[in-house]
Image (cartoon, grey):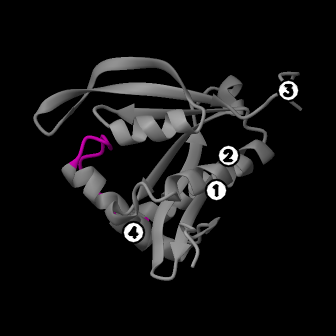
Amino acid sequence: MTNSPGAVRDAVPSDARRCAEIYAPYVRDTAISFETEPPTAGEMAERIAAAQHEHAWLVLEDEAGVSGYAYGGPFMSRAAYRWSATVSVYLDADRRRAGGGRALYSALFDRLAARGIRTVLAGVGLPNEASEGLHRALGFAPAGSYRRVGWKLGRWHDVAWYQKDLATDWSPPD
């Protein structure tokens, strides 16, 4: 028997409903996401398509179906930031701490590096020890924090930023 968290693959439009289901509890019940209304499957499909245009959106699938996803997107809108991306990962509650986040991020980093991304950044709404631990374990370094930038669940929340270099060659980009 294998301890594999599942297979990672590129998301397809039909994954949008399941990704929305995975994400909804994070939106409704936590300050992990600063959204206040869970996106619909249609909205999630638009997000998947947008991410795949220049970055990537991956899902983790096992015998029961899609149990998590990760994606990259633009860090900022200015052209000079094109070589950096923000990244996020979300898993079903019963799939956390089982290697799925690591598997998704590993594949995501490979896809982003192949697209010329040199640096990835992750914003972590605080408190969130599990996410901070995952990012540190994957080689992210603290890059700073924004204090009291999100109001959710009756209180202000900070966001810690983590950064990881995907590149080893810092010559000018093509």
Vertical placement of 2 versus 89: above or below?
below
Tell which of 95 and 45 is nearer to you: 95
Residue 93 in percent (x, y) is at: 32, 61
Confirm whether the magenta stretch covers residue 74. Answer: no
The answer to which of marks 3 and 2 sits earlier in the sequence is: 2
The answer to which of marks 4 and 3 sits earlier in the sequence is: 4
Disc 2 residue crowd, few under 14, some 14–19, many 20+, Cα 10 Å: many
Residue 109, disc: 2
Which residue is at 28% across, 33% downward?
127
Residue occupying the far bottom of the picture: 63
The answer to which of marks 1 and 3 sits earlier in the sequence is: 1
Look at the numbered discs 3 and 2 and tell me whether their residues touch, using CB distance below 8 Å: no
The amino acid beneath tag 1 is: Gln
Look at the numbered discs 4 and 3 and tell me whether their residues touch, using CB distance below 8 Å: no
Residue picked out by circle 3: 169
Q: Nearer the viewer, mark 4 or mark 3?
A: 3
Q: CA distance from mark 3 to mark 2?
A: 16 Å
Q: CA distance from mark 2 to mark 1?
A: 14 Å
Disc 3 residue crowd, few under 14, some 14–19, many 20+, Cα 10 Å: few
Look at the numbered discs 2 and 1 and tell me whether their residues touch, using CB distance below 8 Å: no
Secondary structure at numbered mark 3: loop
